[in-house]
Amino acid sequence: MDVAERTRAKSASLPQRDADAPTRPTDPGAKGHDRMVLNLFFEERDDRWFPGDRHLRPLLRRLLMGKSFVSGQRRVLLNLCAGLDRLGIRYRLNDYRYIRKHPEELACIIGRPFVLDWFKWQNPLLLGVAMYDHPIDAPESLKDLDVRRVLVPCAWYADMFRPHWPHVGAWPVGIETDLWTPAPAAQKSVDVLLYDKVRWDYDRYEPELIEPIRKHLETSGRTVEVIRYGHYKEDDYKAALARCRSMIFLCEHESQGIACQQALSSGVPVFAWDRGGPWQDPKYFPDKVRYEGDVSSVPYFDARCGMTFTDADGFTAGWGRFWSQLSAGGFAPRDYVLDNLTLEKGALRYYEIAEAAIQRHA
């Protein structure tokens, strides 16, 4: 079984939709084989030592270290494929031989941009959502390719890209709502899951933000469980959500925030640190890029999901109101995800974007 078949098999093994999930959108497979077949390409890593070793390194790592953390990029691919499967939309995955023989067909490149260097692409391209962190990273050679559309995960990220690439759009992948489901109230034994995804300047934010939050919760008599981004397996996170009544989400900013949305799908209301201000990725800020639009840590969020705060003082001021509303059953986070972020909705939207990209120049 090659890489494409393995990945597709993995996506097809996702559980079936649960009873309270929304009904399937209008099935784009209704026209059967007249519909466009998507050509999807995803690679997390390039060859390092010899051709093809990118397939072997993950297997060796798994043998030595056990099941690996599922990256956000791989989760995008798996969830997109699962949604396409449910809608009956056909796709090929990493079929480089086919795409080179059919230069007129759209190539949808989801993973890292080094794929563009593997051969001279003649095809029209749909790039993203996991390509470049910012357009200044793109090589000059990209201008020689037929890029029809660039996708990023949310509106604020698209606004940041648009002065450089006007053909950019926002597309969030769907969430596995039948896997991330609410646990019975009787199973809830912990008040708060503190999700720590603070990535930069940790020496500053640990005493300035994280510890004051922990101390306030302890003083309030709340039980707390902590989980750190990149240091857990999905099964551990799912079990933690089943135990916890609420989640505090700490991250400087998010382009989509899949982990947060998995919590929402699990019926766990979120109190999120949403500091605002400029995009402060230290790889770019402040010397290379200064973008001060509507940067957010929860770009997909409304009043059903929970509440937000900007700093430690804002947390202290708002925590009581958040907990009171939670205790009164005033949040409905799963409803938000079912209305906006199911696997089917995400996959159908992706298909429509791809179809429009190829038809625009037909």
Image: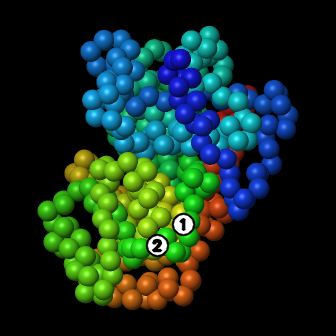
Mark 1 highlights which residue? Answer: 183
Check whether the beta carbons of the residues at disc 1 and disc 2 lie within 8 A of each other: yes
Identify which amino acid the numbered label 1 is placed on: Ala
Q: Position of residue 9 (x, y in %)?
A: 58, 30
Q: Is 261 or 254 nearer to us in this picture? A: 261
Q: Can you give x and y, in whole percent of width and height, for residue 61 in the image?
A: 30, 29
Callout 2 crowding tier (Cα within 10 Å): few <14, some 14–19, many ≥20: some
Along the line of sight, which residue is nearer the eye, 198 or 214?
214
Label 1 environment density (alpha carbons within 10 Å; few <14, some 14–19, many ≥20): some
Q: 34 or 85: nearer the eye?
A: 85
Q: Position of residue 274 (x, y in %)?
A: 38, 70
Relative side of 281 to 249, left or right: left
Residue at left 76%, top 51%?
24
Between the residue at mark 1 and the residue at mark 2, the CA separation in whole angstroms equals: 8 Å
Res 340 quadrant in image: bottom right
Residue bearing the label numbered 2? 188
Reply above or below: 340 against 39.
below
> What amino acid is at disc 2?
Lys
